[in-house]
Image: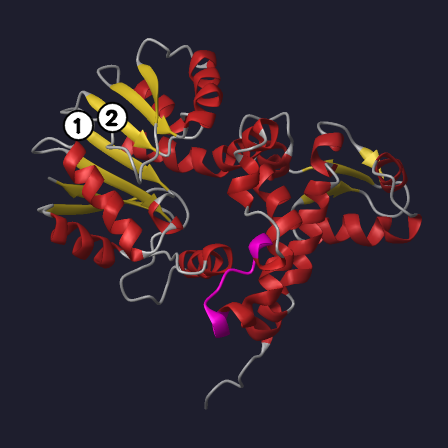
């Protein structure tokens, strides 16, 4: 006899925005940072966060039930404390902090995703541009402080993938690397730390160079990592044995993707490698939920931009002239797809 159908997964997903908003709000309030390594009662923590008494117990205990916050004891005298994961990833004092992207999710994307139905009907962006404002990147590149904050947010979520690439990709036969759209220089830093023969270049727009240089200097790698400035749709890419693009290709439509792939091919020597890092959609488009949702996010942000599968990448790179391909799983939903010239 067949088991009765259970609507739990449907309801859990439908109400999922409740969970999301609680976590994003906690990060926006800097709850995990203010709590740090202390143990505080609900009243003490609520006072520090300037919360009304009505929501204190429900809010903190929801985070406990969701496993993002811990609690010792019950009732008014119970104390709240960070979980190991909260301390590691959500306390601003941790080098592994990933809350920057959550601040952006809460401030921008949460409301823009409300217009997903319109995006699906029209194929047009649903971000600031729709409301007659300047686009996010246009604003960021005109305000250095906000640009650095954004780069920091991207660094938080990229670090684990760049570390994994540096560990898993065989760099032993290569001497030079250029990271295209290098931002803070993080990919170059992680690769250079693990592979002393590598000389690296972090390539990005002119406004980004001072930010990257500061991070490279702080890492003590100025002798092996340089910055280069340019527009990758206008200027040729710096020559290197390995060309990397971390979450770059998915920002663009197919025409611009092909431009970047051709530019990478031209910058590589025979035997060189082009590496793209993304939340790669599985070829059957059945499993990597994050990759598929990221592609919908590209619709909301840019309209005609989209994420892709390894099969898509192989097809595009094959058209350009690449001959051999590989896929390396990195962390969570993310992988590196590699094309060899």
Viewer-side residue, 306 vs 138 = 138
Could you tell me which quadrant the C terminus lies in?
Answer: top left
Earlier in the chain: of badge 1 and badge 2, it is 2
Q: Is residue 193 above or below residue 27?
A: above
Q: Tell me what residue is drawn at x 22 percent, y 58 percent.
A: 311
Vertical relation: 306 (above or below) 211: below
Magenta stretch in the rendered image: 120-129
Residue 19 lies, in percent from the top left, at 66, 57
Numbered badge on residue 177: 2
- Does the CB distance between marks 1 and 2 fall below 8 Å? yes
In-image side of 27 versus 97 (left or right): right
Residue 331: image tag? none
In the rendered image, which quarter is residue 1 located in? bottom left
User: What is the distance, in whole Å, between disc 1 and disc 2 at their CAs?
Assistant: 6 Å
Vertically, is 189 above or below 81? Answer: above
State the residue at coordinates (39%, 59%): 288
In this orientation, does residue 67 appear?
no
Residue 109 in magenta stretch: no
Q: Mark 1: which secondary structure?
A: loop
Taking 49 as reference, is 96 left or right? left
- 235 displayed left or right of 77: left
| Mark 1 neighbour class, 10 Å CA radius: few under 14, some 14 to 19, many 20 or more | many
**Of residues 220 and 131, the one drawn nearer to the viewer in this rendering:** 131
At which x and y percent is residue 271? 9, 34
Q: Position of residue 326 (x, y in %)?
A: 18, 46
Q: Classify 10 Å Cα crowding around label 2: few (below 14), some (14-19), many (20 and above).
A: many
Dot 2 falls on a residue whose secondary structure is strand
Residue at 40 percent across and 30 percent down: it is 205
**Residue placed under numbered mark 1 in the picture:** 241
Q: How is the image coloured?
A: secondary structure
Kindly tell me whether residue 219 is visible in this rendering: yes
């Amino acid at each position: 006899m067949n088991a009765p159908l259970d609507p739990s997964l449907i309801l859990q997903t439908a109400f999922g925005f409740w969970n999301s908003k609680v976590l994003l709000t906690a990060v926006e309030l800097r709850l995990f940072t203010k709590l740090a390594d202390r143990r505080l009662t609900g009243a003490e923590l609520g006072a520090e966060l300037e919360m009304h008494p009505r929501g204190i117990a429900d809010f903190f205990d929801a985070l406990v039930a969701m496993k993002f916050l811990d609690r010792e004891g019950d009732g008014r005298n119970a104390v709240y404390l960070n979980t190991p994961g909260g301390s590691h990833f959500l306390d601003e004092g941790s080098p592994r902090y990933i809350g920057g992207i959550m601040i952006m999710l809460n401030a921008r994307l949460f409301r823009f995703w409300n217009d997903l139905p319109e995006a699906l009907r029209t194929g047009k962006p649903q971000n600031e541009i729709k409301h007659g404002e300047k686009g996010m990147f246009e604003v960021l590149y005109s305000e250095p402080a906000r640009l650095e904050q954004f780069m920091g947010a991207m660094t938080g979520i990229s670090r684990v993938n760049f570390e994994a690439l540096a560990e898993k990709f065989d760099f032993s036969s290569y001497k030079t690397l250029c990271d295209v759209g290098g931002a803070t220089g993080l990919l170059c830093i992680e690769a250079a730390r693990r592979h002393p023969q590598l000389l690296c270049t972090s390539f990005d727009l002119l406004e980004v160079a001072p930010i990257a240089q500061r991070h490279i200097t702080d890492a003590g790698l100025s002798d092996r990592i340089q910055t280069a400035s340019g527009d990758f749709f206008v200027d040729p890419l710096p020559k290197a044995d390995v060309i990397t693009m971390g979450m770059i290709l998915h920002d663009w439509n197919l025409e611009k993707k092909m431009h970047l792939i051709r530019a990478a091919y031209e910058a590589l020597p025979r035997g060189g490698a082009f590496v793209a890092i993304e939340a790669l959609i599985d070829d059957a488009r059945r499993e990597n939920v994050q990759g598929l949702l990221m592609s919908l996010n590209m619709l909301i942000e840019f309209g005609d931009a989209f994420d892709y599968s390894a099969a898509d990448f192989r097809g595009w790179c094959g058209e350009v002239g690449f001959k051999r391909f590989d896929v390396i799983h990195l962390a969570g939903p993310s992988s590196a797809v590699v094309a060899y010239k």
